[in-house]
Amino acid sequence: MTDLIFKIVPRAEWEAESGDYHGSAHDKADGFLHFSTAAQLPETLRLYYAGENDLMLVAADAAGLGTALKWEHSPSRNQDFPHLYSVLVCDAIKWAQPISRDSTGNFMLPDLA
């Protein structure tokens, strides 16, 4: 099975890109694209996207990203996160699905397989 990592992107930003994804303003300021593992997604959404709607979840093949993908420790969450020090190339993208909300406003992730 492919090891997937995930990028949360506002839909308008995702649709504005054609081909490779170059990252958000936050990614560009930090010098890398922020990703999460499947286990890290709920907390990432809660901490950084609570007030946002119309988000996309982009799945990427970690192995397909090569040496530009670095696992780095985040002291604020005390976990290692995948950081991509290049653009996200089309060939590494497996799928992109909307992130919806349930009737109480909680994020509902698509099937992560």
Image (cartoon, rainbow, N blue to C red):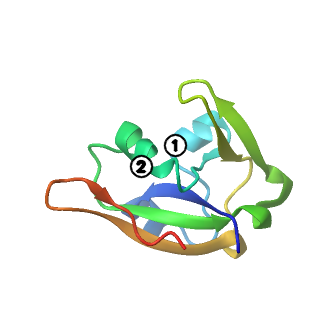
Residue at the spot 30% in from the left edge and 43% down from the top edge? 50
**Residue 49, picture quadrant:** top left
Instruction: Count numbered badges in the picture.
Output: 2
Q: Quadrant of residue 66?
A: bottom right
> Looking at the picture, does residue 67 appear above or below residue 28?
below
Q: Is residue 44 left or right of residue 61?
A: left
Q: Residue at x 47, y 55 (%)?
A: 8
Going from N to C along the chain, the mark reached first, 1 or 2, is 1
Q: Residue placed at 67% from the left, 47% from the top?
A: 82
Which of the numbered marks, if any, corresponds to residue 108? Answer: none
- As drawn, is 58 to the left or to the right of 74? left
Amino acid identity at mark 2: Pro
Image position, residue 81 (x, y; %): 64, 42
Picture layout, residue 89 above or below residue 46: below
Q: Residue at x 62, y 56 (%)?
A: 22
**Among the 4 quarters of the image, the one containing residue 74:** top right
Look at the numbered discs 1 and 2 and tell me whether their residues touch, using CB distance below 8 Å. Answer: no
Q: For the residue marked with disc 1, what is the amino acid?
A: Ala
Q: Secondary structure at mark 2?
A: helix
* Residue 56 relative to residue 3: left or right: left
Query: Residue 57: horizontal and vertical position, in percent?
Result: 46, 63
Residue 42 is labelled as 2
Residue corresponding to mark 1:
25
x then y, percent, for residue 58: 52, 65
